[in-house]
Amino acid sequence: MSTPLHVAVIGAGAFGGWTALELCRRGARVTLLDAWGPGHSRSSSGGETRIIRGVYGPDKVYVDWTARALPLWREAESRWGLPLYRRTGCLWMCGDDDAYVRTSLPHLADAGLAIAGLSPREARRRFPQIDFAGVASVFYEEEAGYLLARRACQAVAAGVAAEGGEVRLAAAAPGPIAHGRLERLELGRGFTLAADLYVFACGPWLGGLFPEVIGERRILSTRQEVFYFGPPAGDPRFEEGACPVWIDLSGERIYYGIPGNEHRGFKVADDTRGEPLDPTTAERTVTPSLLDAARSAMARRFPALAGAPLVETRVCQYENTPDGHLLFDRHPHAANVWLLGGGSGHGFKLGPAVGEYAAETILGDRAPLPLFALDRPAFTHGAPMRTQFDAAV
Ligand SMILES: Cc1cc2nc3c(=O)[nH]c(=O)nc-3n(C[C@H](O)[C@H](O)[C@H](O)COP(=O)(O)OP(=O)(O)OC[C@H]3O[C@@H](n4cnc5c(N)ncnc54)[C@H](O)[C@@H]3O)c2cc1C
């Protein structure tokens, strides 16, 4: 029997965790390392919840990956006996330009993901707790909902350990590159780790680890603030079951929200990219003006929550590529190194599908999709940041 390939995966967030798991399932010997542990509070995959939705503007690959990820999330839930995916539906509220949703409709149909347009009357009837003023068209995506983020990262890492991998708390730096290959990882205090292949899935830290090949300009971490408001006592209208996940594309800024959150409060966030942030050293306290703005946006759509108190906050970061697409490519000077990241505020849901794709590409020694390449023009030139919703506005 041949010795299995040893793959070191650095980063146990949504991308690294799932990639490690899929590598184990394909027979690799896997070491999964993370500096602070899966789903920790500085990581982009930390916190309570993330939306899963299939509408993705013109970007068919992400619609297909969402469609692939959904059964994999369900399979993970039943395998591990944990709730990870909550099917609440997703309500899309658009202004006069609903191109972002409409361009996705054929891709959703191809992928078998159900979505329905709702007349304003029907929308008001189904969701009386929402004020649809200024909304020109409404769509309801059936299988969308939310995922339990931090819990899922922990479950995936536990899955890696259960399926034969090794999970370690360690901060890894790439060691020397010689003859076109990375020789080892430096783990600090003189410790090293050598493997056959290395996958760096380091989220907002990826640019800093590879300053010449990526750099912090091409994966820019921006401050994203999330607010949880407390609904009135005994009021079920803002819980899942009555209230879906919602994305409001009708205004100048795009707000979105998640009901329930395991009773942590009614989550509201602004998708606008914030100030650059250092993911290691940033203090994670919220900005009063952004809190006021979020509260107003919530009160406009959910009038009964106008006086709701703030019950929790979270400051996270998006790790943005210039064009909003992921990064997945081989290191140009080290053939045994793969770089994976650039979730750009939308990567979490895709984790299981990205993990499958990455593991197959890496073990199959295949060329990755050009859309995610290091040398794509938008990435090379560091074009202005494109957000997931740019097609809508
Ligand atoms: C506020 C917010 C809302 C979002 N909403 C959604 C949403 O609704 N739906 C959605 O799909 N996505 C959403 N996203 C995006 C999504 O969460 C991210 O794209 C995804 O989690 C990125 O995962 P990752 O594995 O690339 O990064 P991370 O989760 O940051 O994981 C990287 C890991 O690498 C480790 N690491 C880094 N450097 C080293 C090193 N040198 N040695 C060892 N370990 C290292 C870190 O400790 C970290 O755990 C949101 C993000 C934020 C911040």
Image (cartoon, grey):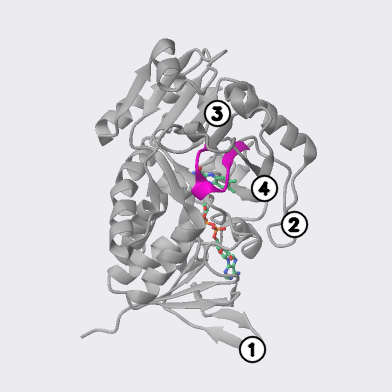
Residue holding disc 4 = 313
x, y (%) of residue 57? 43, 29
Q: Which mark is residue 242?
A: none
Residue 330 visible within the image: no
Whichever of labels 1 and 2 marks the residue nearer the N terminus, that label is: 1
Indicate left or right for 332 with 254 as reference. Answer: left
**Decide: marks 3, 1 in contact (CB < 8 A)?**
no
Whichever of labels 3 and 1 marks the residue nearer the N terminus, that label is: 1
Whichever of labels 4 and 1 marks the residue nearer the N terminus, that label is: 1
Quarter that holds the N terminus: bottom left
Task: Please identify, in this view, whether the residue under mark 4 or under mark 1 is nearer the observer.
Answer: 4
Residue at point 41%, 16% (across, down)? 125
Label 2 Cα neighbours within 10 Å, binned few <14 / some 14-19 / many ≥20: few
x, y (%) of residue 123? 42, 18
Task: Please identify, in this view, whether the residue under mark 1 or under mark 2 is nearer the observer.
Answer: 2
Residue at point 38%, 37% (across, down)? 144
Magenta stretch in the rendered image = 258-270
* Residue nearest the viewer, comparing 329 with 75: 75
Between the C-alphas of marks 1 and 2, the distance is 28 Å
Residue holding disc 1 = 190
Residue 109, placed above or below residue 221: above
Disc 3 element:
helix
Task: Please identify, in this view, whether the residue under mark 2 or under mark 3 is nearer the observer.
Answer: 2
Residue holding disc 2 = 282
Q: Which mark is residue 390?
A: 3
Between the C-alphas of marks 4 and 1, the distance is 39 Å
Whichever of labels 4 and 2 marks the residue nearer the N terminus, that label is: 2
Whichever of labels 3 and 4 marks the residue nearer the N terminus, that label is: 4
Instruction: Give the residue at the far right of this rendering.
Output: 288
